[in-house]
Amino acid sequence: MKITIIGTGYVGLVTGACLAELGNDVFCLDVDEKKIAILNNGGIPIHEPGLAEIVARNRAVGRLQFSTDIAASVAHGQIQFIAVGTPPDEDGSADLQYVVAAARNIGKYMTDFKVIVDKSTVPVGTADKVSAAITAELAVRKLATETTFSVVSNPEFLKEGAAVEDFMRPDRIVIGCNDDTAGENARALMKQLYTPFNRNHERTYWMDVRSAEFTKYAANAMLATRISFMNELANLADKVGADIEAVRHGIGSDPRIGHSFLYAGCGYGGSCFPKDVQALERTARAYGQDLLILRAVEQVNDRQKHVLGNKIVERFGEDLSGKHFALWGLAFKPNTDDMREASSRVLLGELLGRGATVAVHDPVAMAEARRVLELDFANQPEALQRLRFCENQMEALEGAEALAIVTEWKNYRSPDFEQVRKHLKAPVIFDGRNLYEPTVMSDIGFEYYGIGRSVLTRG
Ligand code: NAI
């Protein structure tokens, strides 16, 4: 099938590459000329395991092309996926300007029936706005009545770091269609497109458009809630002398609760949870409902990003000038170079803000971190000078008062602790992802601070 992807970012590029891999003829559009140039020169603008190979393979056989040519992109695909960003507006609601611009472009150039798929995470009611934008452009061209289209909601559930795998083997595919004639045509085309994913068993949940739009926010809000819930319990566990890891096992074994997403840590980040929780809250507010739970989820997370900094201050004092720390992990989670809303940025703000020097390491996010941190500290160039990027994780430890771990990269899970001790000035670890066992750490002579694990560190 002929597919157009509008917006070649994390979601668009993965969607385009994977649909090409399944035999479709895919045209990926982006307004960012630099991004398209990188892709057309055989590069990949993001780090995502397995993606480079799929992109190279499908480009080579002509099933995947990248371009900034809007007219050509509209002409290409009968199915047009909108996968542009939906960043938070100033008040936290989703900024739909890129979605609407993409819809307008479709309306400006389309000449035959199109299925427009909202792949971006968009608030309930956005499909109507997309329809209205297209209709307005068709009206300008005096084609409003003869050119038909249908807007479908097909939210994306892939996880960065495992995006290709998630896209190729989805737990579920959610598709919301209208029940008019154009909607029925759209449904038939979507069914055909997703047939390869439903071979062994049906994974598609068909629903109305608004429910599909809502489902994506409900999923992210639920996951974020579980994390904040566990983080709040972890902070209490620290106070009452319980071990949150034991508690996690104890409750996760109940099938009504399940084991996933119960990990306490130093807060969630990324391009989705923070903005989607906020956007759902703002949608509710627009309808006169105060989503108390989600407000709390957000507040707990904002607070949790300071938990490592607070523990460090408790141990080393408010004034950290003259003190040197090591930090492992900059990306918001492993297997990605994405720094959006990463907890490391908050911790660095605290450490550098209190006068410390910091040596940092991340296996893949160093270049992106440099770019983002230069912006974060644009008004504090002096603080930025106290930050050193190290290519080697052990080198980052050299002479540090303590190591703080923010991202649970595999490289950090079982380091040579002898080497860690040798490089650090003192054997002190603040573990924001509960990677190590406190008893083991204490046995091998480390002063160890996890999240919600104080019962075992008190000795
Ligand atoms: P991104 O920022 O990586 O990519 C968006 C791309 O769209 C950019 O390259 C931008 O230049 C391009 N763009 C903007 N306006 C355009 C236009 N009018 N025409 C063509 N291209 C245009 O964003 P990302 O992370 O891929 O997210 C896209 C959407 O998918 C968001 O709504 C996000 O919430 C959602 N999503 C993201 C996931 C993730 O893990 N990143 C997972 C699931 C959903």
Image: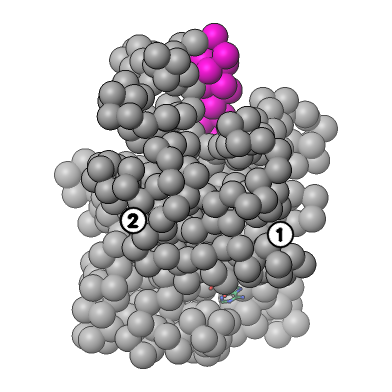
Q: Give the quadrant of the C terminus.
A: top left
Image coords of residue 447 (percent x, y): 42, 30
Foreground: 302 or 297? 302
Q: Residue 394: which numbered mark, if any? A: 2
Q: Secondary structure at mark 1?
A: loop
Q: Is residue 106 above or below residue 254?
A: below
Q: Is residue 55 above or below residue 187?
A: below
Q: Quadrant of ligand 1?
A: bottom right
In the rendered image, residue 230 lying in the magenta stretch gets the answer yes
Q: Earlier in the sequence, mark 1 or mark 2?
A: 1
Q: Residue 95: which numbered mark, if any? A: 1
In the rendered image, residue 189 lying in the magenta stretch gets the answer no
Region of the chain picked out in magenta, as a range: 223-240
Q: Quadrant of residue 357?
A: bottom right
Q: Is residue 121 visible?
A: no
Q: Is residue 34 above or below residue 4?
A: below
The residue type indicated by label 2 comes to Met
Identified at 70% across, 38% down, the residue is 318
Image coords of residue 216 (percent x, y): 52, 43
The residue type indicated by label 1 comes to Asp
Q: Residue 371: which numbered mark, if any? A: none
Foreground: 255 or 387? 387
Q: Is residue 68 visible?
A: yes
Q: Nearer the viewer, mark 1 or mark 2?
A: 2
Image coords of residue 450 (percent x, y): 45, 29
Identified at 54% across, 27% down, the residue is 231
Q: Secondary structure at mark 2?
A: loop
Image coords of residue 113 (percent x, y): 50, 73
Q: Are marks 1 and 2 in contact (CB under 8 Å)?
A: no
Identified at 57% across, 63% down, the residue is 387
